[in-house]
Image (tube, rainbow, N blue to C red):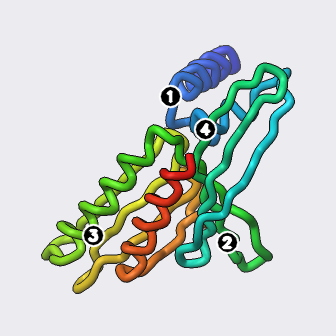
């Protein structure tokens, strides 16, 4: 009887965790990543380097399925994270339809958020559908800006400087023009 009850409890807990979207830590994908990963395609990827912020390379990527001729473009962020046991490359893709939102976020952070430091801990965050994140958080007397390339990976943070915001804005505007 105890073993039957144990099996029922285990089964119920597995069903609950399977239904909880936060229980799964699968990587979220942008529309461009889903397009480039589709089966039955012959995918061409063209990478155009736009610039770099805090050792994070920013590129425009043009994807083309050579079988059906469909195309999609995105902005790609690449950062080599140095860990105690070696290094690993972290990647994020920002879809073309998310670029304007990220540019607007950069401008708001640069013009309205960074000039004043709040008295309490505060976070300001832009998030994309693929798990990319950009923003800043307050520490005692200053803001710390960052990019986070992978949603569930604390090693994918790229900490930037306040002085990097004009450069990041310029890179994103150039990237938008090359989509």
Q: Badge 1, how many Cα within 10 Å: few under 14, some, many 20+?
A: few
Q: Split into 4 quadrants, where in the image is the N terminus?
A: top right
Rendered image: mark on residue 81: 2
Residue 110 percent across, percent down from the top left: 27, 70
Rendered image: mark on residue 29: 4
Which residue is nearer to you in this view: 56 or 72? 72
Rendered image: mark on residue 20: 1
For label 3, the SS is: helix
Q: CA distance from mark 4 to mark 1?
A: 18 Å
Give the residue furthest to the front: 177
At a point 86% along the width and 30% down the height, the residue shown is 42
Residue 169 percent across, percent down from the top left: 40, 65
At a point 36% along the width and 47% down the height, the residue shown is 101
Q: Badge 2, how many Cα within 10 Å: few under 14, some, many 20+?
A: some
Instruction: Determine the image quadrant of residue 112.
Output: bottom left
Indicate which label's residue lies in the foreground, 4 or 3. 3
Indicate which label's residue lies in the foreground, 1 or 2. 2
Could you tell whether 80 is left or right of 55 in the image? Answer: right
Residue 177 percent across, percent down from the top left: 50, 52
For label 2, the SS is: strand
Q: CA distance from mark 4 to mark 3?
A: 28 Å
């Amino acid at each position: 009887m105890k073993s039957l009850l144990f099996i029922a409890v285990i089964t119920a807990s597995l069903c609950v965790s399977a239904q909880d979207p936060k229980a799964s830590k699968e990587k979220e994908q942008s529309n461009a990543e889903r397009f480039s990963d589709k089966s039955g395609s012959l995918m061409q990827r063209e990478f155009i380097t736009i610039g770099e912020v805090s050792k994070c390379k920013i590129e425009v990527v043009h994807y083309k399925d050579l079988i059906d001729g469909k195309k999609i473009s995105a902005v790609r962020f690449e950062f080599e994270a140095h860990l105690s046991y070696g290094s690993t490359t972290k990647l994020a893709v920002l879809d073309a339809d998310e670029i304007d939102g990220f540019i607007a976020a950069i401008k708001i952070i640069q013009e309205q958020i960074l000039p004043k430091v709040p008295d309490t801990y505060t976070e300001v965050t832009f998030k994309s559908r693929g798990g990319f994140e950009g923003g800043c958080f307050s520490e005692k007397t200053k803001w710390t800006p960052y990019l986070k390339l992978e949603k569930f990976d604390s090693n994918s943070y790229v900490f930037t400087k306040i002085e990097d915001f004009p450069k990041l804005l310029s890179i994103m505007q150039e990237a938008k023009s090359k989509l």
